[in-house]
Amino acid sequence: MKVEPLDLPDSWVCTPAVFGDDRGVFLEWFRADALADATGRSFTVMQANHSTSRRGSVRGVHFADLPPGQAKFVYCPRGAVLDVIVDLRVGSPTFGRSTSVVLDDVGRRGVFLSEGLGHAFCALADDSSVTYLVSSVYNPAAEHGVHPLDTDLALPWPGDIDAVLSPKDAAAPGVAAARDAGLLPAYADCLERYAALGA
């Protein structure tokens, strides 16, 4: 697996070698050793999540309180999604910036994002499946969101898709309101967390 940094600090794209023959394909879609070598940090999987979405479904932007926060490895085994990572760390030099990667069942890439970064995706095809490996178990009291259509973030959603949001995501505050309410993680706290994980 090839692990390369994205243009948003503390996030990476992971490209596996795909071996195909007349039976189909085989690949290693996650390698903890390759990820640790490239990122310089540990990633302990505490929970695995899976979603299936129809075209146009937008999930996110989600993040979790620090400590411990929640790092994620995101993979799309079926269909296609536009995966978006957002810097929500107050005090970060790249606060409010985002990066995006198409994850699909052709390129077979995944993304890894560190604690404090926000995550969202838009399904580009019906029945798109996304699998998430996460570093902390679900804790409703520590889970938060920022509105994915917030004009301050101007996330790169496809122009030919009408976004379908859950009621929870549709009610999420914009990034400015979330910052003013003290919901967003502090960059200094994130750096402290990364250091503890060996980053």
Image (cartoon, rainbow, N blue to C red):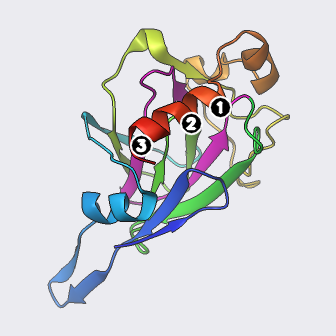
Q: Secondary structure at mark 1?
A: helix
**43 relative position to 168: left or right:** left
Q: Secondary structure at mark 2?
A: helix
Magenta span includes 60: no
The residue closer to the viewer here, 147 or 53, is 147
- Reading the image, the residue beneath label 3 is 72
- In the rendered image, the vertical position of residue 30 relative to residue 113, given as above or below: below
Sequence order check, earlier mark of 1 and 3? 3
What amino acid is at disc 3?
Answer: Lys
Q: Is residue 40 visible?
A: yes
Residue at the image position 14 percent from the left and 84 percent from the top: 23
Q: Within 10 angstroms of label 2, few (less than 14), some, or many (20 or more) residues?
A: some
State which region is magenta.
62-90
Magenta span includes 88: yes
- Reading the image, the residue beneath label 2 is 191
Q: Within 10 angstroms of label 3, few (less than 14), some, or many (20 or more) residues?
A: many
Residue at the image position 32 percent from the left and 66 percent from the top: 34
Q: Are marks 1 and 2 in contact (CB under 8 Å)?
A: yes
Q: Position of residue 124 (x, y in %)?
A: 55, 56
**149 relative position to 6: left or right:** right
The residue closer to the viewer here, 67 or 13, is 67
Give the quadrant of residue 163.
Answer: top right
What amino acid is at disc 2?
Answer: Leu
Distance (Cα) linking label 1 and label 3? 18 Å
- Reading the image, the residue beneath label 1 is 187
Q: Position of residue 83 (x, y in %)?
A: 56, 52
